[in-house]
Structure formats: structure tokens, C-alpha cells
Image: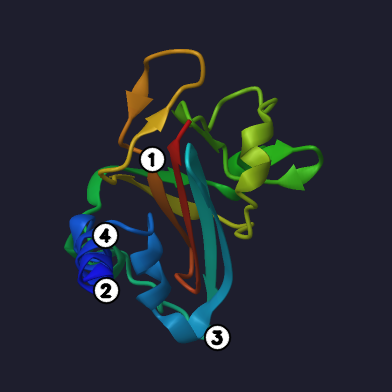
Amino acid sequence: MPRIFFLLFALLILTSCSKTSPAGFWENFHREMLVKNISDQGPGGGHRAMHWISPKQNAFDSAAVIAFAGKNGWHLTKAYSFKQDSAAKWMYDGKATFPLSNTGFNPYDSFNNSTYSLFPRRINSDLKVYQFKTGWMAIEPGSDKSTEENGFVLVNDSASKMSVYHIWGK
């Protein structure tokens, strides 16, 4: 009898939440070109930073990236273009970062936020940034402010490099 309860409990856990790994679906996007996958998840939140490199230009077509995200529950809300010299200012502690925190994407911030260090930037050229509503919430510490626009895809100017950044929880 205890085995039946254990099996039912295990089945309930496996089927009760369709989003068991935030942004984990990106691991299946051009898996052979994924070179970095940082994922830290805890009971209060977490983050993910991923990076792909292709030897070919136009490997990361924006339309295909946006469609893949959409099929997996991420909905495009904004798109930005940044020149290399603007993105080069995104630094924390002397390292290239993506300025993402629990308050959202802050491309013109003072860059004095240690959370930015969780998102190493590996694209150092002109780039496009796609902002997505992910269905996961990022909550600003010490407040009741939150956002679901907390998933980002960066594609370099030749579409040969791509990064994904996601933050959720507190």
C-alpha cells in the first residue's frame, strides 16, 4: 500500500507543474552550439545565463528565435538595438555584464548593482535585445513590485552569437 501512495505522490509532483525548470527549454535550442549554461535555482528564485556560438553567420535568425520562445510560453514585449559602444558600458566590477536584476533590464543604470554579475555578457558587438514576458515573476527585494518581463535574448550583429538571460523570484 505505501508504494501506491508513493507512486501517486510522485506522479502528482511530476504532472502538477509544467514549468519545472525556468527557461530550461532553451537547452533544446541548437543544443550543439550551446557553449555556456549557468543555472542557479533555489526556493526563493534564481537565474539563468546561456550562450551559443555558431561558426556560420545568420545561425540565430531573429524570427526563429522569437517563434521558439513563443512556442515555449515566452511572449515578446519589446525589441532594442544597441551599438557596441553603448553595450560596452554594461560593466560590473570590471567585467562585461548584462544589466538585469529583479527590477528588470536597466541599460542606462549606474551599473552599481551586484546582481548584474550573474549575467556575464559574451557579445561585444552591435546587438539586438529581445525582451519577453515569461510567466515567471521577478520581485524587487524589499517591495511588492514585480515583473514578468524578465527573459531576454541577445543576438549579435551577424547572428552568429546568442545569449539568453532570465531572472525570477526574489
* Residue 150, quarter of the rendered image: top left
Q: Sequence order check: which comes first, mark 1 or mark 2?
A: 2
Determine the secondary structure under disc 2. helix
On residue 13, the disc is 4
The residue closer to the viewer here, 96 or 116, is: 116
Depth check, mark 4 against mark 3: the one in front is 4
Disc 2: which residue:
3
CB contact under 8 Å: marks 1 and 3: no
Counting from the top left corner in percent of width and height, residue 163 is at: 50, 61
Determine the secondary structure under disc 4. helix
* Residue 88 visible at all: no
Q: Sequence order check: which comes first, mark 4 or mark 2?
A: 2
Determine the secondary structure under disc 3. loop
Q: Residue at x 22, y 65 (%)?
A: 5
Distance from disc 1 to disc 2, alpha carbons, whole Å, reads: 41 Å
CB contact under 8 Å: marks 4 and 2: no
Distance from disc 1 to disc 3, alpha carbons, whole Å, reads: 29 Å
64 relative position to 159: left or right: left
CB contact under 8 Å: marks 2 and 3: no
Count residues near mark 2 (Cα–Cα under 10 Å), then give few for <14, some for 14-19, many for 20+. Answer: few
Q: Sequence order check: which comes first, mark 1 or mark 3?
A: 3
Depth check, mark 4 against mark 2: the one in front is 2
Q: Mark 4: which amino acid?
A: Ile
Q: Residue at x 76, y 46 (%)?
A: 95
Counting from the top left corner in percent of width and height, residue 152 is at: 41, 49
Distance from disc 4 to disc 3, alpha carbons, whole Å, reads: 41 Å
Is the residue 44 above or below the residue 81 in the image?
A: above
Disc 3: which residue:
55
Disc 1: which residue:
150
